[in-house]
Amino acid sequence: MPDKYWDDFDTGFTFKTPSITVTETHIVNWAGLTMDFYPLHMDREFAARSPMKERVAHGPLIFGMAVGMAGLARVEGGSIIAWMGVDGMKMLAPVKIGDTITNNVEVVDRRETGKPTQGMQTWRYTIKNQREETVMVFDMKFLMYRKSSGA
């Protein structure tokens, strides 16, 4: 049984996740898992000649870390039935080795479904670095249990 439900998260509800410092190990492991060895991520000399001036983390790595940080926060209390997709993903600034990122989450939309046992919500994930610069933003869509479900 869930500890929380769709009904417990009003539009405007916010929470902040634990932070994590992005390391070279994260980047190397991600490259190995995804086969994305693009030199901007892997080659120090190539990256030094780029507009970034140094190696940066893969965008999808930051997405994955943001999802994981939200899960570690355990705010949803078992209310999520399924992830339904992501909209509006934007990478707004590079994440460099040694940057510390935090996910700031806000419920931006909620709606009923055709079933009284379920509801849909959109949670905006805004990932910021240690300088409070927004580095990534996207909207996660979740199918959730409703209290009327008797779950």
Image: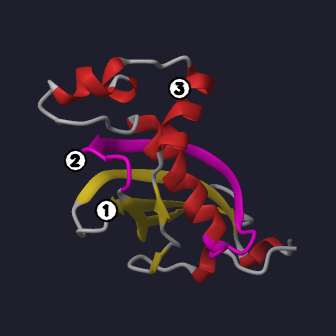
Image quarter of the N terminus: bottom right
Secondary structure, mark 3, is helix
At label 2, counting other C-alpha atoms closer than 10 Å, the crowd grade (few under 14, some 14-19, many 20 or more) is some
Q: Which mark is residue 31?
A: 3
The reply to whether the C-beta atoms of the residues labelled 2 and 1 are less than 8 Å apart is: yes
Percent of width and height locating residue 9: 54, 78
Residue shown at 30% from the left, 68% from the top:
130
4 horizontally vs 65: left or right: right
Q: Which of the two marks, 2 or 3, is nearer to us in this view?
A: 3
Percent of width and height locating residue 4: 71, 79
- Residue 141 seen by the camera: no
Task: Give the spatial CA distance, label 3 vs label 1.
Answer: 21 Å
Which residues fall within the magenta stretch? 73-98
According to the picture, the residue beneath numbered tag 2 turns out to be 93
Q: What amino acid does circle 2 point to?
A: Ala
> Which quadrant of the view contains residue 151?
bottom right
